[in-house]
Amino acid sequence: MTDTVISSARREVIIGFNRPFVIIGERINPTGRKILAAEMLAGDYSRVESDARAQIEAGAHMLDVNAGIPLADEPAILARAIQLVQSITDVPLSIDSSIVAALEAGLAVYKGKALVNSVTGEEERLEQVLPLVKKYGAAVVAISNDETGISEDPDVRFAVAKRIVERAQDHGIPVCDVVVDPLVMPIGAINQAGVQVMRLVRRLRDELKVNTTCGASNVSFGLPNRDGINSAFLTMAIASGMTSAITNPLHPETVKACMGADVMMGHDPDCARWIRKFREAPPPSADGTASRGRREVGARRRV
Amino acid sequence: MTDTVISSARREVIIGFNRPFVIIGERINPTGRKILAAEMLAGDYSRVESDARAQIEAGAHMLDVNAGIPLADEPAILARAIQLVQSITDVPLSIDSSIVAALEAGLAVYKGKALVNSVTGEEERLEQVLPLVKKYGAAVVAISNDETGISEDPDVRFAVAKRIVERAQDHGIPVCDVVVDPLVMPIGAINQAGVQVMRLVRRLRDELKVNTTCGASNVSFGLPNRDGINSAFLTMAIASGMTSAITNPLHPETVKACMGADVMMGHDPDCARWIRKFREAPPPSADGTASRGRREVGARRRV
């Protein structure tokens, strides 16, 4: 049993084998969001704030913060975004950048124990990121690719993850502070991707004893009804032992799938969180949520 | 790898380890449906017909037919219902009764190879039902309880299933024609029920080499938003190796969960069934389905 403790100044979240699944909200990320990118570049963080509040309201336990804007001063923008988010909420954060200086700027202003997102198995990244993780006493997401790219062979991806975990230990970072991302391939392109990742998650848990995370929505790339595929993936990944995901809590299906999986795994004692969430569902409104409300009332009546 | 072939006069359905999950529609059952019971008793089978059509339209691969009406001539009503359903559709049927004479009456009129639902591990039932299954060349659902009731211990339930499979073999019924129902407990009462049933399904598949089925909705008894729990359960059960379920295909979430799980298991080559189903989603209508329609369009745009 492995617990990864992540914290803000006032709150701890624990990613762990026998605990509820941790949803890390992915929305504060300007990649592919032109308006958000322009606003952050102009020093307007109002959307960062509203995205933070909305994701927590929707069920996120942590938030990922990314400021990847081409040609911008990413370290300064990331640090500012982190300070702002920490000023309005106490959920722990994942500091997300592919630029080492930005990770360091974020870590320098962060209050608590952050999750650094991420390090890969590439030699140069390992030697740059791991010392930072150690210096700030953070935890780190380890992505199982290296100089040769992302292998389609799950055994190779396991070997890369193992190497990162060992290298982290060399730097004084304990196994419990490495959260492995096994990399989820699009199932539309690789039909065996689901079975592969389930087996890989199980091995990472049983053999490496590490917690796991992933960017969940990659699995449905190119398919219609992506929420449906993402929900099936998350439910099965949790059954296989996955303990967190970086995903979009603003999709109600995603949150419901994770909470339902927690119930099925016995990680929601007396189903208390499930009952609280769905007993308090708002009554049918006049807009498009009406049919959903009706169905839930029907479901309660069946009880 | 075990294949259980069920057929009508013109169509085969195969329940198998490396095949799409088989949804057996549960709606043709007067238990708890007073109007349907009264109609069937009065010889009016119009609702049986419409229920049959609606379930197939919604995604059922087989239909369960039950005529359990207190004090009625159940053998005659069940036989009549089966003949009617077979006259309007060619999906294979599961003949469902706790009365042996009704099972026999249903088998006598059934065209094809039926699934008999069910036999338990009770001595008297075994000796009455198994000869019938053999006589008509049918397959049978084996429910893992016996004279001592339903054990909360999954090892005991496994042992009961093993005994039924062995006894079936004594009667000349091959392992591939026994589909075991591991019995799913309400998770609201037994928080470990989900983990237990996943382990049990895995053992039934790996050790007994049998296909499995279940009454899926029992798991959510007493909880709000039952569809959400049922969907999480079915997805996880499929990940553990469950190959069919007797459930309600008129709940779109249930069908979506099973189809999404098929995609994740690699049992929907090129995701062709998923794409066909969700590309052809109807455009938003004026009623409560509008928000759902919009979301799916949005999901397609993301592609």
Image: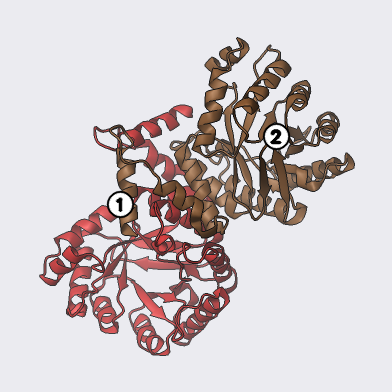
Chain colours: A brown, B red
Q: Which mark is residue A298?
A: 1
Relative to A218, say whether B110 is above or below: below
Q: Which amino acid type corresponds to the residue marked 2 in the rendered image?
A: Ala
Q: Which amino acid type corresponds to the residue marked 1 in the rendered image?
A: Gly
Answer yes or no: are tags 2 and 1 on the same subunit.
yes
What secondary structure is marked by label 1? helix
Q: Residue at x 20, y 69 (%)?
A: B81
Is residue B293 toward the left or the right of residue B81 in the image? right
Q: Quadrant of the N terminus of chain B?
A: bottom right
- Whichever of callouts 2 and 1 sits on the residue coming sooner in the sequence is 2
Name the chain letter of the residue that bears numbered label 1. Answer: A
Looking at the image, which is closer to me, B88 or B225? B225
Residue B188 coordinates in the image, percent (x, y): 46, 62
User: Please, which residue is most extreme toward the front here?
Assistant: A10
Answer few, some or many: residues within 10 Å of disc 1's Cα (few below 14, many 20 plus, some between 14 and 19): some
Residue B197 coordinates in the image, percent (x, y): 53, 66
Q: CA distance from mark 2 to mark 1?
A: 43 Å
Q: Which residue is mark 2?
A: A9
Residue B63 coordinates in the image, percent (x, y): 31, 63
What secondary structure is marked by label 2? loop
Q: In this figure, what is the number of numbered marks?
A: 2
Can residue B226 be seen in this snapshot? Answer: yes
Asked whether disc 2 touches disc 1, contact meaning CB atoms under 8 Å apart, the reply is no
Answer few, some or many: residues within 10 Å of disc 2's Cα (few below 14, many 20 plus, some between 14 and 19): few
Q: Which mark is residue B48?
A: none
